[in-house]
Image (tube, grey):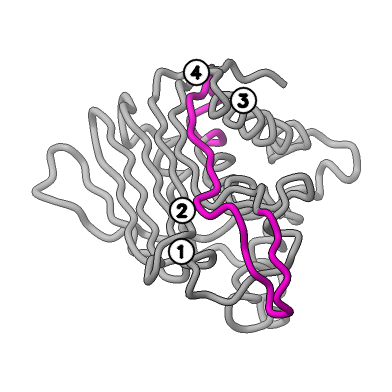
Amino acid sequence: MLLRNRWNPDWLALAEEVRSGFLGKTYVARVSRSASYWHPSRPPQARWMYDGTQGGGYLAGMLVHDLDFLCSIFGRPQAVCAEVRSSEPSRTLPDGETINVSADDTAALLLRMESGVLAILSVSVIGAHADHYRLELFGSDGTIVGDGDLRSIDYRIGAATDSGLRPLSVSEREPSHPENLPSGLAGHASRAMALMLEDWLAAFIGASSEVATFDDGLLSLAIIDAAHRSSEGGGWVEVHT
């Protein structure tokens, strides 16, 4: 599920532009996500979401997709410096029980990439009316930005010599049987999954494939682990897999 998002139409188009050299020398990659899921005015989520030992939290639950995507186009990180926190220490469930919150609702990461890119990523789900997404990729030859909410994002692109930004041409690639996909968000996710599986077909029969592997998923987990260690006082922490 983590790697599947690379096959979203907009991310396919973004990756193609970056790998073609559109940005030139890339300076900065910045991503910000926000939502209101854990604001005190919102109903509680499933109990496990508030427990860090059970995989709860939004660094691993939301921002990890952006970590994976940036690594797929800019390469591995050398080190990470981060703050990962739970803004509210407890939550009261509908039955009146109060539980301790050990999972994160907010995280901010700085990554030094081996390619020389500085990656800046943040997520917070503790704000009211805070459904927002922002992407910025800055390079010597061009800029790519994305702005919107978590369901609809407007991506724009422009060379340094252009007068401004223009809409990004999104990938029109479709899976073999798009008519079988469900509608809505489920269809969006299913489409990406179908494209990913089609690209993995060669690997299923033992042939070489350049698509994402288990090691890519492991790298994202290593970054998250390093971020937590940094937040606990480790400063800049090297990323190892």
Q: Residues within 10 Å of mark 1 (few under 14, many from 20)?
A: many
Measured in 3D between alpha carbons, the distance from the residue under mark 1 to the one under mark 2, in whole angstroms, is: 6 Å
The residue sitting at 56% across, 36% down in the picture is: 72
Report which residue position mark 4 lands on: 235
Kindly identify which residue carries mark 2: 124
How far apart marks 1 and 3 lie (CA) works out to 25 Å
Kindly indicate whether the residue at mark 4 contacts the one at mark 1 (C-beta within 8 angstroms).
no
The residue labelled by disc 1 is: 35
What is the quadrant of the C terminus in the image? top right
Establish if 148 lies above or below 111: below
Of mark 4 and mark 3, the one earlier in the sequence is: 3
Q: Provide the secondary structure element on which disc 1 rests.
A: loop
Q: Which residue is depicted at the point 43% across and 29% down? A: 110
Q: Position of residue 33 (x, y in %)?
A: 43, 54
Q: Earlier in the sequence, mark 2 or mark 4?
A: 2
Q: Which mark is residue 229?
A: 3
In this rendering, position of residue 105 left or right of residue 165: right
Q: Which contiguous range is marked in magenta?
A: 71-100
Residue 208 found in image quarter: top right
x%, y% of residue 95?
73, 79
